[in-house]
Image (cartoon, rainbow, N blue to C red):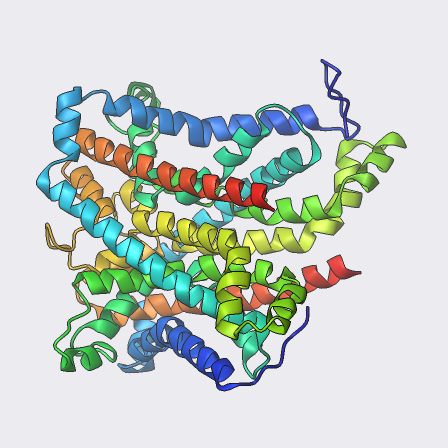
Amino acid sequence: MNNSNNKKKSYVIPGFRLSFGIVTGFLGLFVVIPLCVLALYSLELSFDEFIANVTSPRVFASYRTSISTAFTASLVNAVMGLMIAWVLVRYRFPGKRLMDGMIELPFALPTAVAGIALTHLTVTEGWIGRIFAKFGVSVAYTRIGITIALIFIGIPFVVRSVQPVLEKLEPEFEEAAATLGASPAYTFFHVILPEIFPSLFAGFSMAFARCIGEYGSVVFIAGNTPYETEITPLIIMAKLQEFDYASATSIALVMLLLSFFILFVNAIVQIRAAKLT
Amino acid sequence: MKIRNDSGPVKWVLIGISALFLFVMLILPLVYVVFTALRDGLDSYAKAVTDPYALKAIGLTVKVTVITVLVNSAFGLFAAWLLTRYSFRGKGVLAALTDLPLSISPIIAGLVFLLMFGRQSFLYPFLDANNIRIVFAQPGIVLATIFVTLPFISRELIPVLNAVGTEEEEAAALMGAKGFYIFTQITFPHIRWAFFYGVVLCAARAMGEFGAVSVLSGHLNGLTNTMPLYIELLYQGFDFTGAFAMSSILIVMAVLILILRNILEYRGKKELEI
């Protein structure tokens, strides 16, 4: 499109300066400066205070709760999302369009509404909770409840990430595998899965990152018992309500680093996958 | 796309499990909310949603959503245009920054604006002297909502703009067309369905944002309570009929959004095929 030897770049399509200015200005004001303020503010604490703050037993327990429930929920969504994407791409059946159309519901439905609805469904007298109560399992106000709320939030990520890749997958490989005598299961795990793995991983990590930070749907169903069902965003919220901004900021910084780490791992997986093909 | 019609038991088992999963996780909560909202009869439903505080919350939510969609439409169009029409150093960084709000917890999104404009901020003396209230007031709610939904429109536009290519625009530019003319006459017709789809997604999230808004709102009923915050208030006061009645309005909106989404996606796909 343009001559990269030229030091002074000029584009055929006009408007570069205007759009560059607007986009960088906007991102600077809305994203870069706010995040810098966050980082700067956490410097108000000394290093030792910072460490003591982010590793206090109650905070540490909240990382465990947040990470374990978000990971389990994203794993469930990876399996179910792959299955749903498969069903939507490969099979023809009545109600298929409806099934395809409702996948984005968790994006469209406010999380607080999902939260109170799921809570009421899963308390021991609720429509679903009653079934679990027979087996002596309580769902609402436990980690299982948190996981269920996070599964709800994460449904669209894996489906929508795997679906287009599955659609583009050429049938030749599978046919070749079948001709050579591979069983359907063998074909799936050795031919199809490697092809769609990058998209599956991308969906998984996006769901994971979203679930770790999720607040609205979880706060109602979690019960918020310290050390047990208290998620990290809730701890930040509690610190803010006590006007303990320094602690809130330091914990937020740890969460932010965790999100960046997830993004980073996903980027590496995607780059390696792109190199292989 | 070729559909393989292997109609073994595997097919129906997989369809069955998927359908059951989606029914329990997605449909049942909706049914439950509507059922509970109407349990005490239409009168108490009508009373709950026409309560003065409820109406104020609805009004604020509409206001925040409209502002957010306007601001993010402008940003989304410029960002998508910049990231697909030019190549320059640092483009990857800008693309990553644009998508960043997606992976930041809403609570943190609220927190950063609290730190920027709150009482302990270096800007606070200036804001206070000029009587500008951002934190625990409506501007804070708007800021947080814009941040959370920042990438929604550009993410829908970028793949379409990449697929369409730049030949037509370059031709127009070489023939002397101005940027604005190129955009409205050539580019926008290609991306309009994707754009409207992005607007719908952005509006949906703006309407329902809870965490970020919760940090910045201060929960002044009738003043800074959006619909989700008002629902929380009712719920915590054990007014379940009221909470579910307000929720049912948001559910109707969500279902409308889904229907609209499917129409827009269908039209967009059809146009790309032609």
What's the residue at 32%, 77% (across, down)? B32
Q: Which residue is farthest top?
A: A7
Residue A246, x across and y down, in percent = 19, 28
Q: Is residue B188 left or right of residue A215?
A: right
In this orientation, which residue lies closer to the viewer: B145 or A277?
A277
Q: Which of A84 and A125 is in front in this view?
A: A84
Image coordinates of residue A207 in percent, x first then y, are 39, 53
**What residue appears at the point 52 percent right and 40 percent down from the top-left corner?**
A271
Q: Out of A125 and A179, give the one closest to the viewer.
A: A179
Residue A88 occupies which quadrant of the picture? Answer: bottom right
Residue B168 as seen in the image, left or right of residue B20:
right
Q: Residue at x 61, y 23 (%)?
A: B89
Quadrant position of residue B144: top left
- Residue A134: x, y in percent? 15, 82
Residue under the image location 11 percent in, 43 percent down: A58
Q: Is residue A25 visible?
A: yes
Rendering quarter of residue A276: top right
Quadrant for the N terminus of chain A in the image = top right
